[in-house]
Amino acid sequence: MLVESFEATVFGTNCHVLAPAAGEECVVVDPGIGVEDRLLEVLRRHRLRPAAVLLTHGHLDHTFSVTPVCGAHGIAATVHTEDRYRLTDPLADLGPALLAALTAEYGRLQWREPQEVVTVEHAQRLAVAGLDVTVSHAPGHTEGSVMFSVARPGEPDLLLSGDVLFAGSIGRTDLPGGDSAAMVRSLLTRVLPLPDATDVLPGHGPATTIGRERATNPHLLQLARSTAPGTES
């Protein structure tokens, strides 16, 4: 499988491109702010044809370029049902100070809703660009946060964890739509049961594995201790 990841211009958001191999269709995951030129270079270098954009959630730093990317290739944006509303106006989530800072740096931010949006639910399987992708609804960072699990025959699955799980940390829950209790449930029911060998590509920061996070991530370690038999939570 061909996998290439690069950071957006702002917030260090990872944009991921996945395809069975060079010269085939691909999916683009979380095209954030300022990724269009770099994405075009990746597509040209590997001779890839985008078949869909997958969004792990609806925050602006993961969705800002979704409309131009979808429009350029005549493809749909895919997002969980509960974050669909965020694609109407993700700028509304930005506080005045952050919006002013971004405007000063990049000029007036403009948003257009994607022409075609496909909504998905938990456990839904997607056959797209020759890939077998399973949706895992993992709320907490937002109501509709998801992780995408990509099957790789003969290899461990690849997990696109969005802002649910990072190397050494987890997604924050103090932004609009965040819920700390929901995040705990997501970590317990969606993350911890995964095999250690699962490779993880987060929404920010370096790649990791479930096994590494299970052994070293302080948030997962705390959850494991609190739910161990004979331990009061």
Image (cartoon, rainbow, N blue to C red):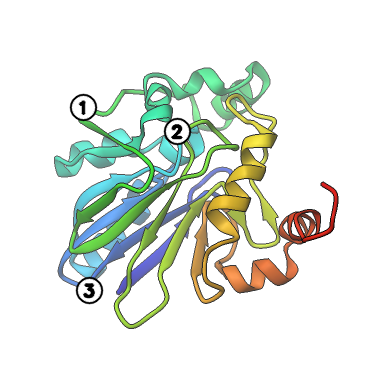
Q: Are marks 1 and 2 in contact (CB under 8 Å)?
A: no
Which amino acid, by three-letter code, is at mark 1? Gln
Residue situated furthest front in the rendering = 230
Q: Name the residue under label 1.
A: 115
Kind of residue at badge 2: Gly
Between tags 1 and 2, which lies in front?
2
Residue 211 against residue 44 in the figure, above or below: below
Position above or below: 58 against 112: below
Q: Which of 7 and 187 is in front in this view?
A: 187
Callout 1 crowding tier (Cα within 10 Å): few <14, some 14–19, many ≥20: few
Placement of 115 over or under 137, stated as above or below? above
Dot 3 corresponds to which residue?
21
- Residue 86, quarter of the rendered image: top left
Q: Picture coordinates of residue 231 (x, y %)? A: 84, 55
Q: How many circles with numbers are drawn on the protein? A: 3
The quadrant holding residue 105 is: top right
Q: Earlier in the sequence, mark 3 or mark 2?
A: 3
For residue 78, which numbered disc appears in the image? Answer: none
Residue 203 screen position, x and y as percent: 52, 51
Q: Which amino acid does label 3 sit on?
A: Ala
Q: Position of residue 215 (x, y in %)?
A: 72, 71
Where on the picture, by quarter, is residue 88? top left
Q: Quick one: SS at disc 3? A: loop
Residue closest to the eye, 140 or 163 = 140
Q: Which mark is residue 58?
A: 2
x 70%, y 55%: residue: 169
How far apart are labels 3 and 2 at the CA level? 28 Å
Q: What element carries label 1?
A: loop
3D distance between C-alphas at marks 3 and 1: 28 Å
Q: In this view, does 183 lie to the left or right of 64?
A: right
Mark 1–mark 2 distance (CA, rounded to whole Å): 16 Å
SS for dot 2:
loop
